[in-house]
Each structure stands twice: as structure tokens, then as C-alpha cells.
Amino acid sequence: MNIDKIKRVYLLGIGGIGMSGLARYFSRLGCEVAGYDRTSTELTRTLEEEGMPIIYTDDVAAVPASFESAGEDTLIIFTPAIPADLALKSHFIKAGHELYKRSQVLGFISASRFTIAVAGTHGKTTTSTMVAHILKDSGYDCSAFLGGISTNYQNNVLFGDNNVVVVEADEYDRSFLTLHPNIAIVTSADADHLDIYGEASKLQESFQMFLDRVVEDGQKIVRKGLPFAADINYAREEVCDAYAENVVVKDGEFYFDYHSEDLTIKDIHLGIPGLHNVENAVAAITVAKLLGIAAPKIVHALSTFAGVKRRFEYIFKSPEHIYIDDYAHHPEELRAFLTSMKKLYPNKKLTVVFQPHLFTRTRDFVDGFAEVLTLADELLLMEIYPARELPIAGVDSQWLLEKIRLENKRLVSPEEVLAIVKSESPELVVTVGAGDIDKLVKPIKEVLTNA
């Protein structure tokens, strides 16, 4: 495929965070961009405001006439999350179009660029966004395709004037195997997506294959403890090639020192909270160091890094109430998030509103979820968000709830969450999950604002 010849792009599943990044990329290039998604969201409405027409019904007749004829100037992109029997997909195939996955297109775009790819079952969105911000803020510059909305730039795709691109490398459906990174980071490789991989060993094989795609003389940066050969290992408070120590919280802000063989940076202020984000910052600093970015510029960038939407995002903060929203949907992500909450606010009662994501993930990790959710002081557990899945007999939130050894726990609907927040006025509340729990963010904020 010759990306330079593309004039029209249609995206099936345009509202996904990765797909919408591609939509914005091609729109910025001046292409005609349109798409389909199942439901209207804040993100799809923003794309429409940016000039991209979107349909929400599987209606072939609603596709613009300009996309009818196949040719080298027309590109059809789809996400594996769309149904296999989608009429629109069949229509484009019958019309002679070759359909490409998002990951394939990302591979085409990055093929001729110096690529920094960040992979991991968790931590990759924040780390890739942090790397991109350091490069932007320092003046080094880059383009970036991110898996979340950067708070600093209010976007999930960044445009630069040099040949460097930062890419969030997605392990789902082995998507990251289309990339040839010059620098690769692996933040984690916990068992996940077992509906795709079947077993954890297959997932780890995929991560090894990703690292094997690093170009000759490239750099492999891997979190210490993962079973992969690396050029540089990194960690938080474990001595290795690059690590953090003296991690402290001052007035709700995280500070730490960075150490590597040839660089020590003292008293770094991290603009976002979280012990896990200190570790993410170590990886990002290591990339910046490899690129020759000076320590003072790295320090400034990290202090101004505002994070990613729905990653440890402060929604409301007053003397009486603190409300934080987070995307965590795997037991280890939850552990990192809730542990950081406890370190930040050791004397406050922690109310956790959690929505499990996928029946298969809940089934595969039910004991892990049950164990880590005991970190809450009060748990409001919502029903499982199914996403692309059909129900599995015996797998539901009541089953999970019964396994959680916590006295103050309840199974609740979204309406009951709002009623409880209004009546109990919790001093420290978090919403956590990757489903449609984000629909509660504004209502909860309104309740606390008027409390």
C-alpha cells in the first residue's frame, strides 16, 4: 500500500480509541474520512464536529457514494471488535475493496519512520503518552498514535515535523506484530486476552515475537522480572539498569530519583500520581536518555505531564470530597491503582465503584479480582460490561461478589450508585473499569459538586 496515494478513508468501528486516531491522522492529511460505529459517544461526536460523517446503523445505503469504487486511492479500515457478519463489511468486500486492520495501517505509516513502540498488558497508554510528551515538551518533537486522550494535548494523535513516531503497540489479536520498532518498551505481560490466546504462555510468546521485530541495533527496554531478553531492564525501587528510588509523596504529589549506569537525576516531580506511574516514568526517561535529551528538559516535561483521560484522572477535588476515575480492568491494574490510592490517602475511607469488563476476563481472573478488591473500604460492584461477548452461564457479578472477602460490599445498578453517592457523600470515591462506567463520571461529579 502507498499511503501517499490515499484520498478517501472509511473506518468500520471509527469510535474506538485507536481507530479514531487513524481517522484524525488521515483527516489531517486532507483525506475524505467517514465511518461507522455501533453507538454515538463523546468521541464520535467530536469526530463529527471535526468534519467526519459517521453512521450508527449497519446500513449500506448510508455509505457515501465516493466509497463505492475500489481503488488505490480508497482505504477501508476495520477493527476486529466489529461483528464478523456486519453488512457494511461484506458490502466493501463485494465491491472489491481490500480491508485492512488498524494495526496493518499503523505498520504502513510507521514503516519508514524511527519508531518508538510501547507494549504491555497494562501501563502502555500512560507510558507511550509520557514518552510523547517528553519529546514534545523538550523540543525534540515526534508524531504519536496513543491509546487514550492525552490531557496535555486533548488528543489521541499528535503531529510532529520530524521522522520520529511514538506508537502504543496493542497485543490484542497480535496487532503489534505489524511494527518494526527502533526502540521497544514492554511494561508488563500479565495473563490477559485469554479468549484470543488460550493460555498465558501463548501471550508471552507473542510479546517475544514483538521484541524480535526490533530493528538491528535497536533497543529493547523491558521491565525487570519479565521473561524476555532486554538491552535495558527497568524497575521501581529494584536495582537494575534503570530504576527509581527514594519515592515519596509530598502534599499529594509524587517525587523520586532516577538512576542508571551513566545518569542520576534527583528529586523528580511527577505530574500525575501513582506508584505504577513512577515505574512508567523510569521507562520514559530511559527512552529520552537514549535520544540524547538533556536531564533538565526531562525533569520539566515530567513535572508538566498531565496524564491521560481515564488514567488516574482527578474529576473532583474539594476539602470534603475527592473523586478519581480510572480505566483499570485487569487485577494487576486494579492492584496498582488501589495501592497508590491507599498511599496517597491513608486516612480516608476508600469507596470503589467497579464495573468488570468482559465475561471471559471475569471468569479467567475471578480469584484475582476477588483478592484485590478487598483493598476497598466500601465496594459498589456493577454488572459485567459484555462489550463484544455473549453471556457465559454462571459468570456474573453476583458470583464475583460472593468471592470477595469484604464486609462492606454491594451489587448495584448505575442509578443506585448515584443514590448512594448522594446519600452517603463519600470522602474518597473512585470509578474503575473499561466499559460504559464512564457514563457515571459527570453525574457523580454533579452530585459531589452540589453536596
Image (cartoon, helix red, strand yellow):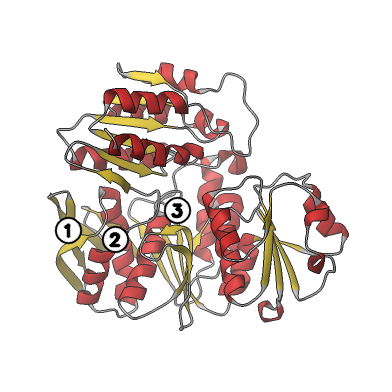
Question: Looking at this rendering, what residue extends furthest in the front direction?
Answer: 450
* Residue hosting label 3: 120
Image quadrant holding the C terminus, namely top left
Question: Looking at this rendering, what residue extends furthest in the bottom direction?
Answer: 162
Residue at 30% x, 49% y: name it.
276
Residue at 47% x, 39% y: name it.
439
Q: Are marks 2 and 1 in contact (CB under 8 Å)?
A: yes
| Amino acid type of the residue that numbered disc 2 sits on in the rendered structure | Ala
Residue at 42% x, 16% y: name it.
402
Say what secondary structure mark 3 lies in: loop
Judge by depth and name the residue closer to the eye, 20 or 201.
Answer: 20
Q: Position of residue 28 (x, y in %)?
A: 57, 74
Say what secondary structure mark 2 lies in: helix
* Residue hosting label 1: 256
Disc tally is 3
C-alpha gap between disc 3 and disc 1: 23 Å
C-alpha gap between disc 2 and disc 1: 10 Å
Image quadrant holding the N terminus, namely bottom right
Q: Is residue 367 left or right of residue 245?
A: right
| For discs 3 and 2, the disc positioned in front in the rendered view | 2
| Amino acid type of the residue that numbered disc 1 sits on in the rendered structure | Phe
Q: Is residue 370 visible?
A: no
Q: Position of residue 251 (x, y in %)?
A: 12, 50
Q: Residues within 10 Å of mark 1 (few under 14, many from 20)?
A: many
Q: Residues within 10 Å of mark 3 (few under 14, many from 20)?
A: many
* Residue hosting label 2: 281
| Amino acid type of the residue that numbered disc 3 sits on in the rendered structure | Gly
433 w.r.t. 268: above or below? above
